[in-house]
């Protein structure tokens, strides 16, 4: 476990020289932060990240040559990331809880200190400290996902379902067929995915009703729902069957090709 007094190897990725200078100046009040590297473009940062392994990354979202989001997969998995930008339209509420923080420019010393203190708390605790996540309500929003193997951003619109796989672990299924396992409970997902298209259709599953394809009654009396992008159907609790069937009927009235059925 890292000690708080050890130097925190830091890289600043920001395309505005004055913004980098301001951040360096404010970080002088935090001597534990050791700025070793800087980059001003996506290309420069990408090359630098091939050879260095920072503890902390200050990452601007709008960069020359692309987006800071493009660099996320290149950042070492154990590095902490603090996103910052001049525009709040990047859905501050949508970043996933494994990101350390998200700062809106102009960054104040007080707000920066809060981020540094959060980093210290993470290093003090043997368990990862989960920062509260704001609810996602817009399909255009993106969610920051970090697993043991990768970190990436996915659009909310691409989420087909989130299914509990036991304990505190869930699997998130995307419309391209990707499946990722995270240490995150359904309750946490439910608090975050609050758009009207998401429904807790069963105690073990949250589904995006935009992908709903069919609702079927089984011989044993249970109901299953099929979703585009999922190989297997999901069991539906009885209290949600009527809601899904009515939703399907409305789509049929609007000319949708799929019709709920019973076996």
Image (cartoon, rainbow, N blue to C red):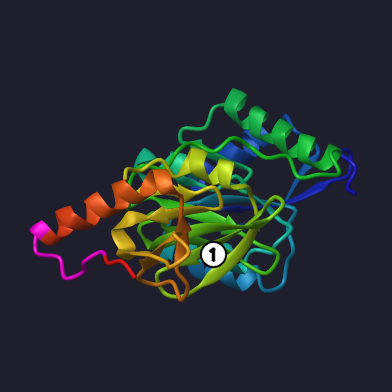
Comparing 253 with 208, the one in front is 253
Q: Is residue 259 magenta?
A: yes
Residue for point 30% across, 48% down = 242
Residue 73 lies, with reference to residue 231, above or below; the image says: above
**Span of residues in magenta:** 253-260
**Secondary element type, mark 1:** helix
Residue for point 50% across, 38% down = 191
Instruction: Name the image quarter holding residue 74.
Output: bottom right
Instruction: Residue 14: give x, y in percent of width and height.
Output: 51, 52
Comparing 29 with 186, the one in front is 186
Judge from the rendering whether residue 165 lies leftward or rightward of residue 83; answer left or right: right
Instruction: Residue 178: give x, y in percent of width and height.
Output: 50, 73
Comparing 74 with 212, the one in front is 212
Q: Which is the main secondary structure of the residues drawn in magenta? A: loop
* Neighbourhood count class around disc 1 (C-alpha, 10 Å): few under 14, some 14–19, many 20 upward: some
Q: How many marks?
A: 1
Instruction: Name the image quarter holding residue 135.
Output: top left
Q: Which residue is at the far top?
A: 110
Judge from the rendering whether residue 171 lies leftward or rightward of residue 119; answer left or right: left
Judge from the rendering whether residue 181 lies leftward or rightward of residue 18; answer left or right: right
On the question of residue 37 being in view, the answer is no
Residue for point 40% across, 69% down = 175
Q: Is residue 209 magenta?
A: no
Instruction: Residue 31: give x, y in percent of width and height.
Output: 79, 36
Instruction: Name the image quarter holding residue 49.
Output: bottom right
Image quadrant in which the C terminus is located: bottom left
Judge from the rendering whether residue 36 lies leftward or rightward of residue 6; answer left or right: left
Residue receiving disc 1: 71
On the question of residue 99 being in view, the answer is yes
């Amino acid at each position: 476990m890292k000690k708080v007094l050890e130097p925190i190897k830091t890289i600043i990725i920001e395309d505005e020289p004055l913004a980098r200078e301001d951040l360096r100046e404010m970080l002088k009040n935090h001597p534990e932060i050791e700025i070793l590297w800087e980059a001003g473009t996506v290309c420069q940062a990408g090359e630098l990240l091939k050879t260095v392994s920072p503890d902390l990354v200050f990452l601007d979202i709008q960069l020359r040559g692309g987006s800071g989001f493009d660099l996320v997969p290149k950042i070492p998995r154990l590095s902490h990331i603090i996103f910052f930008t001049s525009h709040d339209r990047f859905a501050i509420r949508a970043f996933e809880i494994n990101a350390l923080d998200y700062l809106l420019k102009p960054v104040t010393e007080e707000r920066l200190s809060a981020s540094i203190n959060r980093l210290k708390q993470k290093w003090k605790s043997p368990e990862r400290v989960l920062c509260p996540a704001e609810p996602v309500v817009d399909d255009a929003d993106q969610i920051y996902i970090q697993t043991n193997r990768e970190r990436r951003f996915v659009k909310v619109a691409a989420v087909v379902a989130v299914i509990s796989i036991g304990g505190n672990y869930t699997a998130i299924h995307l419309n391209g067929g990707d499946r990722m396992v995270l240490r995150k409970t359904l309750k946490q997902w439910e608090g975050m995915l609050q758009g009207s298209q998401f429904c807790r259709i069963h105690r073990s599953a949250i589904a995006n009703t935009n992908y709903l394809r069919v609702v079927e009654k089984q011989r044993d009396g249970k109901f299953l729902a099929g979703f585009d992008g999922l190989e297997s159907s999901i069991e539906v609790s009885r209290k949600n069957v009527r809601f899904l069937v009515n939703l399907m009927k409305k789509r049929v009235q609007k000319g949708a090709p799929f019709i709920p059925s019973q076996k």
